[in-house]
Amino acid sequence: MKQLLTNAALALACGFLGAATWSATGLADKRTEAYLMENPQLLPAMAQAYEKQAASDRLAQIGEQIYQPFPGAVLGNPDGSKVLVKFTDYNCPYCRVSSEDVDALVAQDPEVKVIIREWSIFQGSEIASVMALAAAEQGKFAAFHKAMFELAPATPETVREAAERAGVELERAQAFGQSPVVQAELRNNALMAQQLGFTGTPSWVAGGQTFEGAVGTSALQAAVDRES
């Protein structure tokens, strides 16, 4: 961690301090290094800024693709001006908690559009993700999403019950779940999560920034408000 902070600080120092130059070997100027050694309190803030910029760069590399949902896999206002992207897993306890935060956010802000990206990283959860996308194809995503978290963990029995609660046509859903478009969506979501540097669920994109964890409704509101 100390080395990470030092490397990040040295990289940023050239831009922030303006006093440093880079040597032919790629090492920071001795004046910069000495300055940072004399002012170690700068390192955490500079490392944080470095990581924030790196995350922004990773998001920019993905581009608008991150904001293009699987058809129907959206909560809230599908035409909302404030967009929140959530990478989630039905067997993740923190995702279950954060689903309530998202519900509260949608209830209090009619301009919020929540794009759900199914990212199955917990054992046994992919069956629920597949059914969720099948429910989206039938216009029943929100109902299934809510029911699945209420019935979690995901098992063949709970997935079926959630689908029935949501009014999903099971035969049609089973056929659609085997289509290449579903597997392509799941692979794409996993790839984007990897590119963004996410380490688990729930993970989020909003206001041009990425963040992780069950952060609460207030933090989610602040994040989507950065875009407006």
Image (tube, grey):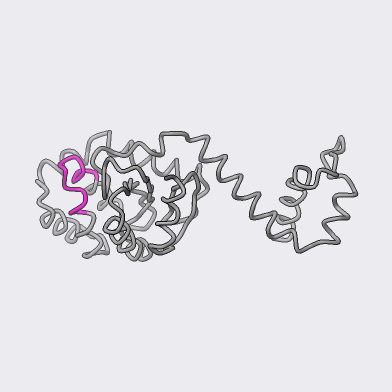
In front of the other: 48 or 117: 48
Tell me: 132 left or right of 11.
left
Indicate whether residue 204 is drawn in magenta.
Answer: no
Q: Pick whichever, 111 or 101, lies toward us.
A: 111
Residue 212: in sight, yes or no?
yes
Q: Position of residue 52 (x, y in %)?
A: 59, 49
Residue extending farthest front: 228
Residue 12 image point, x, y percent = 73, 47
161 or 98: which is nearer to us? 98
The residue at the point 39 percent across, 42 percent down is: 189
Above or below, comparing residue 92 to residue 209 in the picture: below
Res 149 → quadrant: bottom left
Apparent side of residue 222 relative to residue 167 in the rendered image (left or right): right
Where residue 151 sits: x, y (%)?
21, 65
Please tell me which residue is depicted at 9% across the width and 46% down the height of the picture. Answer: 169
Span shown in magenta: 133-144
Q: Is residue 140 left or right of residue 2?
A: left
Q: Write the residue at 71% across / 56% down.
A: 5
Quadrant of the drawing holding the N terminus: bottom right
Relative to 103, say whether 21 is above or below: above
Q: Quadrant of the C terminus?
A: top left
| Marker count (numbered) | 0
Task: Give the quadrant of residue 187.
Answer: top left
At 82% from the left and 61% from the top, the residue drawn is: 39
In this rendering, position of residue 141 left or right of residue 215:
left
Residue 201 visible, this angle: no
Q: Is residue 139 magenta?
A: yes
Magenta: main secondary structure equals helix
Q: Position of residue 133 (x, y in %)?
A: 24, 44
The part of the image, by quadrant, that contains residue 43 is bottom right
